[in-house]
Amino acid sequence: MFENLFKLSENGTTIRIEVMAGLTTFLTMAYIIIVNPDIMSTTGMDKGALFVATCLAAAVGCFIMGFFANYPIALAPGLGLNAFFAFGVVGGMGVPWQTALGVIFLSGVFFLIITILPIRAWIINAIPKSLKMSISAGIGLFIGVIALEIAGITVDHPATLVTLGEVTSIEVILVAVGFVAIVALDRIGMKGAIVIGIVGTTVLAHIFGAASGTAMNFTIPSLAPTFLQLDIASAFQVSMISVIIAFLFVDMFDTAGTLIGVSHRAGLLDEDGKLPRMGKALSADSIATITGSLVGSSTVTSYIESAAGVREGGRTGLTAVTVGILFVLALILAPVIGLVPRFATAPALLFVAVLMVRGLTELDWDDVTEYAPAVLAAVVMPFTFSIAHGIAFGFITYAAAKVLSGRFSEASPAVYILAIGFGLLYGFGLIG
């Protein structure tokens, strides 16, 4: 049965190798079952229901990727996209979380449509590499700002907007210890370094009495508070266009980059450097995102942590299916999730931010028309608390720089179309 489903022999692997690869991938990304509910619960959503929704959305995505596309790539709610959902859309724009879930649903539907049509591949190929890298880096900076705030390292200030917090507090000290521990563990190749960092910080918090307000719940939470609570009708507003585009773009580039990067490491690309069954692989996150919005999750995307499983020999969808099963089994961890204080997730967020910002190193630093728009896009995201504004500024600046420098032909028609579109939205006050 496994041979027929996943073609193990053809890919030079075995059930044992695939299962161990799946376990490795799960350990490297399991932090999301703690971090995602913590971030999204700031919107007023029930934290217990969010925990269940996170596990279920991740499991669905992994099962589709495994059984339908047969690739060793795992999926879960995207870190960065959940922060944009909570702090940018709900917190910053004042959009009810039910409407924000409706936006996630619509973005998933549109995503699936452009995946079935050749539009998605056309857009991915048309967008310059510099802007793709800046989106990833900008999300990293966005996450970093949030992590510093959660940790108490930065606080608001009436004159300078932001300033240094009480760095001698036990919370800040524990976050610093947790972050350094994750860095050290990752350097020596420890599997699950991020999870260990969160757990270690939580244990120390309880030892030093810094975990007030946490408690163990001995029952698996109900999904009812978030199940089918999305408001699709309210999401059909002109003011939501930029938000939908932001979710579409970030997920599109994140998934495409992950698929190509992990598949290259696994030797799954064809002789032309293309990924077979790309359409099926891209459909997995679209369907999982739609499903996630129904149960109460933000956008589901492919995880670069899948590379850890590939390094362990994972080559087929059985790896992804194993990860999906482990996400379902993770529901039994629900009772201990309540023991994790919010600041204990800050070390993990800081570490992920560091990993994402390194995308700036891939910019062409010899061409100002490439790196200037990219850096601007990355910087705008954290300072406006909006991934959407960062993307818009990036495209507008990139197109203008190419035109004014007489290098019009270096940008694709898609870039100019999107730049004009964003400009019109700002001009008519439809986004802001």
Image (cartoon, rainbow, N blue to C red):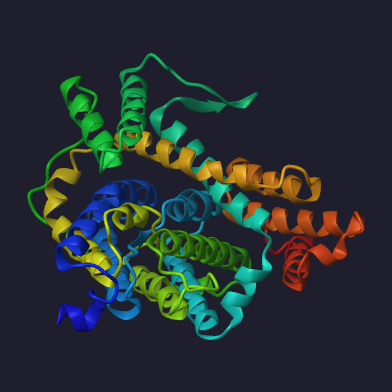
Q: Is residue 24 above or below residue 214?
A: below
Residue at image coords 70%, 64%? 430
Q: Position of residue 376 (x, y in %)?
A: 70, 45
Q: Position of residue 37 (x, y in %)?
A: 31, 51
Is 376 left or right of 5, judged from the image as shown?
right
Residue at image coords 18%, 38%? 339
Residue lying farthest top?
A: 168
Give 421 or 312, whichever is nearer the viewer: 312
Q: How many numbered callouts? A: 0
Q: Is residue 38 above or below residue 299?
A: above
Q: Is residue 201 above or below residue 133?
A: above
Residue at image coords 40%, 40%? 349
Q: Is residue 222 visible?
A: no
Q: Position of residue 130 (x, y in %)?
A: 67, 53
Q: Position of residue 240 (x, y in %)?
A: 58, 66
Give 351 or 277, whichever is nearer the viewer: 277
Give 119 or 345, whichever is nearer the viewer: 119
Is 19 left or right of 414, judged from the image as shown?
left
Q: Quadrant of residue 352?
A: top left
Image quadrant in which the N terminus is located: bottom left
Is 195 left or right of 85, judged from the image as shown?
left
Residue lying farthest left?
A: 218
Q: Is residue 77 visible?
A: yes
Image quadrant in which the C terminus is located: bottom right
